[in-house]
């Protein structure tokens, strides 16, 4: 039963990822707005797990300055990735954009 649950979760994730470009293309919002909401909703969905996990909070408190800088840079590059990917959907097909990304 646990194996089935794992496969269902995996299928749901792959399905969501494979259809995301379609939903972005259908949306009437600009690319920047779509990318912002994608990251904001994800952060909001993960926040309760972070707040309820004492070990996660302790790990974050133990981060050094350099680790914070690298973490923030990674987040900025992820946001830039989504912004450019969603913008590319305005110039090429969904399939081409997804393959390139």
Image: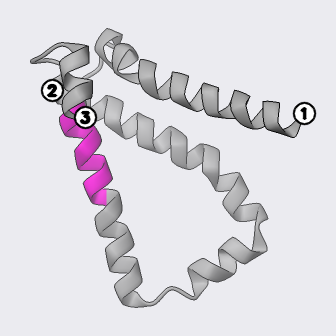
Residue position for label 2:
88
User: Earlier along the polypeptide chain: callout 2 or callout 3?
Assistant: 3
User: Earlier along the polypeptide chain: callout 1 or callout 3?
Assistant: 1
Identify the main secondary structure in magenta.
Answer: helix
Neighbours of disc 2 within 10 Å: few (<14), some (14-19), many (20+)? some
Residue 58 coordinates in the image, percent (x, y): 67, 82
Q: What residue is rendered at 62% in x and 43% in y?
A: 45
User: Farthest top residue?
Assistant: 26
- Magenta-drawn segment: 76-85
Q: What residue is rendered at 36% in x and 39% in y?
A: 36
Tell me where residue 13 sits by quadrant.
top right
Q: Which mark is residue 32?
A: 3
The number of numbered badges drawn on the structure is 3
The stretch drawn in magenta includes residue 67? no
Residue position for label 1:
1
Residue 86 coordinates in the image, percent (x, y): 24, 29
The stretch drawn in magenta includes residue 78? yes
Neighbours of disc 3 within 10 Å: few (<14), some (14-19), many (20+)? some
- Give SS at disc 1: loop
Identify which residue, 29 or 93, lies in the foreground: 93
Q: Closer to the observer: label 2 or label 3?
A: 2
């Amino acid at each position: 039963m646990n194996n089935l649950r794992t496969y269902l979760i995996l299928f749901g994730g792959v399905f969501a990822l494979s259809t995301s470009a379609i939903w972005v293309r259908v949306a009437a919002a600009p690319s920047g707005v779509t990318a912002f909401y994608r990251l904001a909703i994800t952060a909001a969905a993960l926040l309760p797990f972070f707040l309820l996990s004492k070990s996660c909070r302790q790990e974050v408190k133990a981060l050094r300055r350099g680790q914070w800088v690298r973490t923030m840079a990674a987040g900025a590059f992820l946001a830039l990735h989504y912004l450019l990917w969603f913008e590319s959907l305005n110039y090429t097909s969904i399939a081409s954009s997804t393959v390139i990304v």
